[in-house]
Image (cartoon, grey):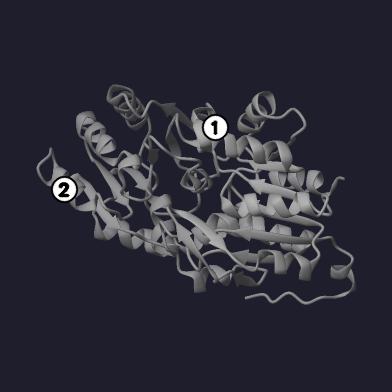
């Protein structure tokens, strides 16, 4: 892992403190950019993502910063409380502090921000989709509103979400936007490295002449996988396969549904995958589907688009903001006829992905990571 060293140019930069729940793959490129732009210190509340553990040793090989952990504290009803935050702020004397969402840590930082008479700038990151932002009610909405009105800005995952908050919560808010996306070149280079694994999977699962539909994510109720399976079986697509990558509490019941359904051999459960084993399936897939009824964003949409997949995306997912007429279609995650017909339409009108894997498909992302990050950095650097 790259170890930061202080030098004259680094000391001339503004100091940034980042408090974040845990390190995840879809944040590494963003955090690396922050570490280049500012003299940054990262503090994580957890050693891994509570709902989905990643190989942290492999993940940190791509990090251009050191990971520090706030280990002292406790968790209460799903909320994290940590000690040592004020001590860290006093020691590092930051110009900017960045935190995540609207939890206890953010409120604690807001308290210190007011107490210090705004000696630093305070930003938070919100993963809310437009649907979730509108639906926030009661205490959750009140807490959100207080933080939005009293910090220097919130980084949202789309222009639409940022605009809604500015129109409905606080006119003074800066419109800061950065979708949860990977840096294009680095992610596509990893896809290239996974081509041999993709060829192996094609042979092992007999997919050379089949059209492949892919889902990647946790197997939980809000992910709506039973809905996807029903739609796939109703579509009755010839020479096709539905590949479900992931694990979770619903896996056993889903496998039972498939076993008793139509053509069970056409649905493949791979279990949870990382690295080349995961990336290889993006290369194989003709069509990627995200059917979630609750999805703040959905980093897998960006990954699928970078691999050149056409995407059918739930209209409730935050990543629906990445979908255009050229790279996919939105559908209602509550209407089986909607997804079924759109699945049939795309699969019948397009030939299977070239299974020889001679070259990569073009990316279907409507914009690049560099374009997004430049706009954000310019606003963060402005006073």
Q: Which numbered mark, 2 or 1, is in the foreground of this view?
A: 1
As drawn, 169 above or below 368:
above
Q: Which mark is residue 261?
A: none
Tell me if label 2 and label 1 are in contact, CB under 8 Å: no
State which quarter of the image contains the C terminus: top right
Looking at the image, which residue is at 25% across and 60% down? Answer: 204
Other residues around mark 1 within 10 Å, as few (<14) / some (14–19) / many (≥20): some
| Furthest residue in direction left, as rendered | 260
Query: Could you say whether the residue bearing mark 2 is in a helix, strand or loop?
Result: helix
Residue 22, quarter of picture: bottom right
As drawn, 39 above or below 207:
below
Query: Could you say whether the residue bearing mark 1 is in a helix, strand or loop?
Result: helix
Q: Is residue 178 visible?
A: yes
**Of the residues under marks 2 and 1, which one precedes in the sequence?**
1
Image spot of residue 359 (x, y percent): 49, 53
| Furthest residue in direction front, as rendered | 115
Image spot of residue 295 (x, y percent): 45, 40
* 3D distance between C-alphas at marks 2 and 1: 40 Å
As drawn, 119 above or below 153:
below
Q: Is residue 50 left or right of residue 243?
A: right
Q: Is residue 272 left or right of residue 125?
A: left
Image spot of residue 143 (x, y percent): 59, 39
Looking at the image, which residue is at 38% across and 34% down? Answer: 293
Label total for image: 2
- Identify residue for label 1: 133
Looking at the image, which residue is at 63% across and 49% down? Answer: 107
Q: Is residue 229 left or right of residue 325?
A: left
Other residues around mark 2 within 10 Å, as few (<14) / some (14–19) / many (≥20): few
Looking at the image, which residue is at 42% across and 53% down? Answer: 77
- Identify residue for label 2: 265
């Amino acid at each position: 892992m790259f170890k930061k060293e202080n030098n004259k140019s680094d000391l001339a930069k503004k100091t940034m403190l980042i408090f974040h729940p845990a390190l995840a793959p879809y944040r590494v490129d963003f955090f690396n950019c922050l570490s280049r732009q500012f003299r940054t210190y990262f503090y994580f509340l957890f050693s891994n993502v509570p709902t989905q553990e990643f190989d942290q040793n492999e993940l940190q090989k791509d990090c251009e910063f050191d990971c520090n952990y706030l280990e002292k504290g406790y968790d209460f009803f799903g909320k994290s409380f940590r000690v040592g935050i004020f001590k860290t702020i006093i020691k590092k004397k930051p110009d900017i502090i960045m935190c995540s969402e609207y939890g206890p840590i953010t409120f604690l930082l807001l308290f210190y921000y007011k107490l210090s008479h705004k000696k630093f700038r305070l930003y938070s990151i919100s993963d809310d989709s437009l649907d979730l932002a509108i639906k926030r009610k009661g205490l959750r909405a009140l807490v959100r509103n207080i933080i939005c009105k009293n910090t220097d800005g919130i980084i949202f995952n789309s222009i639409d979400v940022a605009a809604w908050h500015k129109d409905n919560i606080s006119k003074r808010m800066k419109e800061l936007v950065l979708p949860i996306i990977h840096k294009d070149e680095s992610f596509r280079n990893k896809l290239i490295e996974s081509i041999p694994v993709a060829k192996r999977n094609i042979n092992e699962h007999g997919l050379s002449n089949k059209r492949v539909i892919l889902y990647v994510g946790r197997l939980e109720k809000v992910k709506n996988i039973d809905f996807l399976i029903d739609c796939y079986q109703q579509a009755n697509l010839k020479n096709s396969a539905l590949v479900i990558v992931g694990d979770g509490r619903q896996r056993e019941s889903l496998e039972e549904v498939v076993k008793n359904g139509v053509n069970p051999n056409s649905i493949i459960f791979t279990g949870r995958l990382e690295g080349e084993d995961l990336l290889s399936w993006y290369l194989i897939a003709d069509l990627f589907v995200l059917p979630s009824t609750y999805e703040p964003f959905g980093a897998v949409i960006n990954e699928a688009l970078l691999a050149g997949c056409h995407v059918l995306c739930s209209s409730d997912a935050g990543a629906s903001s990445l979908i255009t007429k050229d790279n996919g279609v939105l559908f209602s995650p509550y209407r089986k006829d909607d997804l079924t017909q759109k699945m049939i339409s795309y699969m019948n009108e397009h030939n299977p992905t070239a299974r020889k894997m001679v070259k990569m498909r073009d990316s279907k992302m409507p914009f690049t990571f560099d374009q997004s990050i430049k706009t954000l950095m310019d606003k963060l650097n402005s006073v």
